[in-house]
Amino acid sequence: MKTKKLTSRFLASMSLIFMLTLSFQSCEWIENLAGDDDSGCEEEPDSTQNPCDTCSMVYKPNIYLYPQVEQQLEVGLSFPQGGSVITSIPEYGEGWSVNVDPQGIIDGEYGFLFYESVQPDVWQREQGWCIRTGDLEEFFRNDLETNGFRGREIDDFVEYWVPRLSNEAYYLIYPQIKSLIDQVIRLNVSGNPDQVQRLFYLIEGSPQKTQPVEPITVTDFSRQGFFVTEWGVIME
């Protein structure tokens, strides 16, 4: 009887150690464990938590598509370092297959493809700006336009994000450019787009004015031919 009790305690202890170890694994490790069912990091439907300690959450990336003629497009996302889509509109499934007209209207009803995802945290936190809360709308409008975004793309960003950035006196804003985003979230669009622009902002509240290294904005993006734009946010 004593041997059985000791064995039970040992097995319980080993189970606890295994669970604690599992919780500290990377997104990629969990994805391999789960298989190819897009559950690389456990889904959080309310999008309020990172599901593993080595992941970061990208909130509300919007993908805008502008083919020169109306056509059916296949749009996919892949995560070379691990990660997954956790929510999307329209439903992502194995990828989007959508009809898009030259004005960017998708399936006759959507203005953009929406998703949120988790993936390894590779984002840069050295080059950026410190912006007073009251100046955020002007800042974002100017910076998005500088990077090639226009019209409703800018309005969508400002209308969604500026009201949600009001709890701090200042916000540190670190731009994440396409070459960095591509390392962890690859965007694949059929039809061979002529130009693709991707820009994420990592945003962190600050009670006081600080000054990170000023980034140099260089963009060769041109809204000519078949082009695609995408913006998103990582919150700290």
Image (tube, rainbow, N blue to C red):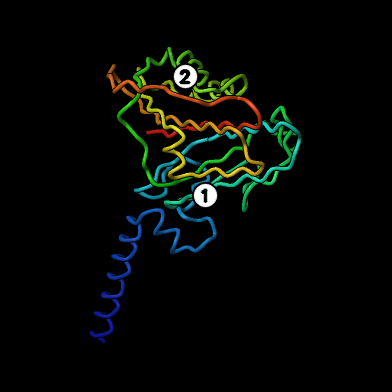
Q: Which of 148 and 204 lies nearest the eye of the viewer?
A: 148
The amino acid type found where label 1 is placed reads Ser
Secondary structure at numbered mark 2: helix
User: What percent of the width, then of the height, locates residue 34?
Assistant: 47, 63
Q: Taking 87 as reference, is 162 above or below it?
A: above
Which of the 4 image quarters holds residue 22? bottom left
User: What percent of the width, then of the height, locates residue 123?
Assistant: 37, 37
How many marks on residues? Answer: 2
Which residue corresponds to mark 1? 78
The amino acid type found where label 2 is placed reads Asp
Quadrant placement of the C terminus: top left
Q: Earlier in the sequence, mark 1 or mark 2?
A: 1
User: What percent of the width, then of the height, locates residue 54?
Assistant: 35, 48
Q: Residues within 10 Å of mark 1 (few under 14, many from 20)?
A: some
Disc number at residue 143?
2
What is the distance, in whole Å, between disc 1 and disc 2 at their CAs? 27 Å
Q: Residue at x 27, y 19 (%)?
A: 210
Q: Residue at x 51, y 44 (%)?
A: 186
Q: Residue at x 74, y 40 (%)?
A: 99
